[in-house]
Image (spheres, helix red, strand yellow):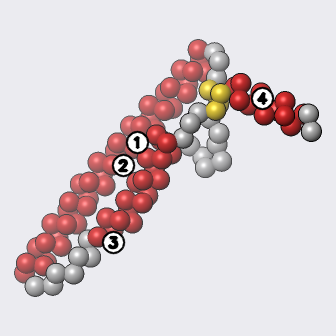
Amino acid sequence: MGDDDEVRVVPNDDAGLRDLALKRIKEKRDFKIHATAYVLVNILIFVIWLIVALTTGTWFPWFIFPLVGWGVGLGMHAWGVYGQKEVSEDQVQREMDKLRDR
């Protein structure tokens, strides 16, 4: 994922578009890896909880804490990859023109 302060501007040329496409593909691949790790690790944590609960009789659902905590992080990662709109060069130019007119 990119820097927090980074604004991605959609370039007009093919080379710039290709670079942006490669970056987005990498971000999506990284998110899929993160989501897979989230699912697998939380299944393992749940199985550990279930084994402990069955053998000791302690049924407190502590597995919820890492599930929810990490889930918030995963949701933020998803928002960073899929939820933000790209900024077009035209939008940047219009905003620059507004700032000049002040």
Q: Which residue is mark 4?
A: 94
Residue 50, placed above or below residue 33: below
To which quarter of the image does residue 7 belong? top right
Amino acid type of the residue tagged 2 in the rendering: His
Place of residue 61 in the rendered image (x, y in percent of width and height, measured from the top left): 23, 76
Q: Which residue is mark 2?
A: 34
Q: CA distance from mark 1 to mark 2?
A: 6 Å
Q: Disc 1 on helix, strand or loop?
A: helix
Q: Tag on residue 1?
A: none
Left/right placement of residue 66 relative to residue 76 reads left
Amino acid type of the residue tagged 3 in the rendering: Phe
Q: Which residue is mark 1?
A: 30
Q: Which residue is mark 3?
A: 65
Mark 4 neighbour density, 10 Å: few (under 14) some (14–19) many (20 or more): few
Q: Disc 2 on helix, strand or loop?
A: helix
Q: CA distance from mark 4 to mark 2?
A: 37 Å
Place of residue 82 in the rendered image (x, y in percent of width and height, measured from the top left): 46, 40
Labels 1 & 2 near each other (Cβ < 8 A): yes
To which quarter of the image does residue 66 belong? bottom left
Labels 4 & 1 near each other (Cβ < 8 A): no
First of labels 3, 2 by sequence position:
2
Residue at 62% x, 26% y is 10
Place of residue 97 in the rendered image (x, y in percent of width and height, measured from the top left): 84, 30
Labels 4 & 3 near each other (Cβ < 8 A): no
Mark 3 neighbour density, 10 Å: few (under 14) some (14–19) many (20 or more): few
